[in-house]
Amino acid sequence: MVPTMATPGNHEYDPRTLGQALDGEKVLSRYWPYIFEFPRNGPKGPEELQETVYYVDYQDLRIISLNSAAAIYHPEAIEPQLKWLEEVLQNNPQKWTIVTHHHPLYAARMGRDNSQIREALQPLYEKYGVDLVLQGHDHTYGRGSNKNYGARYAGDQGPIYVVSVSGPKMYNSSFGEWVDRTASNTQLYQLIRIDGDRLRYEAFTAVGQLYDAFAIQKDAAGNNIFTDQAPEDVQEIITVPKSQAKKEKWSDEDFEDYQRRYQEYVKRKKGF
């Protein structure tokens, strides 16, 4: 009974979900169209894009789902999505635009980089003023933007990017240069409220504690004014559980590298 906008990820293409063809090629789970009923307003092209690439208008908001898994596993599925996305963004009468896809443009976990979708999607996000991009996959938390470093965060372009995890499988933060607020090994859920020209984003821990927040205010010209409202009395969570370190066989050098990256992250935030 709760409205849902699902976007497919790598596990919807996992053989355990009967999403693997006989020749070994990963395909969308056969259960997707039976579980969900989404608008068929997506691009013409591969069948897997139907009801995985779509948009919904709700009051002053347009929410767009993209199939990043299809784009990664099947390169021919990128171009139809790009052409469709530009049309949907170009002819968007709504005041606010949120895009969601599983794989993040900017990774929040070490060793990951989805450069192919970043290079394809980021120019469109910035050209057409997407406000917020909601992503997953990395099982950790990061919130930030595409920063033009060299002038203390001046020249930020495009949307606010969020990577989050709500389930019990969690990993450590990469402390990437795009990040303004992060959390390792932490389950979070989000509440997003829109009231006219103002968007308020809040991220809460599993026990309901406010962990991150920001506001976006649109001025008379439609430009976004961003305000970081992360609670100052809540420290960023960076602890690595002993059980996880043991499972991943962390060495003393691994812990030292993790702390070094964290300290560099703190210095960047302070503008040193």
Image (cartoon, grey):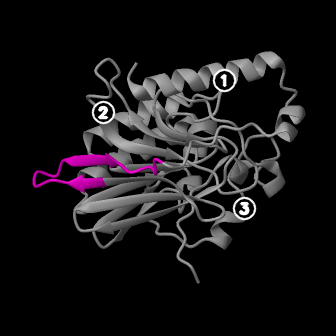
Q: Residue furthest left?
A: 220
Mark on residue 259? 1
> N-terminal of the two: label 3 or label 2?
3
Q: Is residue 11 visible?
A: yes
Specify the quadrant that holds the N terminus.
bottom right
Horizontal side, residue 249 vs residue 233: left or right? right
* Nearer to the camera, 238 or 29: 238
Q: Residues within 10 Å of mark 3 (few under 14, many from 20)?
A: some
Considering the numbered disc 3 on the image, is that residue within a helix, a strand or a loop? loop
Asked if residue 130 shows in the view, the reply is no
Q: Residue 156 shows which numbered tag?
A: 2
| Identity of the residue drawn at 66% across and 41% down | 184
Q: Position of residue 71 (x, y in %)?
A: 55, 40
Query: SS class of the residue under badge 2?
Result: loop
- Whole-angstrom CA distance, mark 3 to mark 2, is 41 Å
Asked whether 162 falls inside the magenta stretch, the response is: no
Residue at image point 52% right, 76% down: 3
Residue tagged 3: 30
**Inter-mark Cα distance, 2 to 1:** 27 Å
258, above or below 70, in the image: above
**Of the two numbered discs 1 and 3 in the rendering, the one whose residue sits closer to the viewer:** 1
Residue at disc 1, secondary structure:
helix
Counting residues from the start of the chain, the first of labels 2 and 1 encountered is 2
Classify 248 as above or below 182: above
Tell me the kind of residue under disc 2.
Asp
Contact between labelled residues 3 and 1, with CB atoms less than 8 Å apart: no
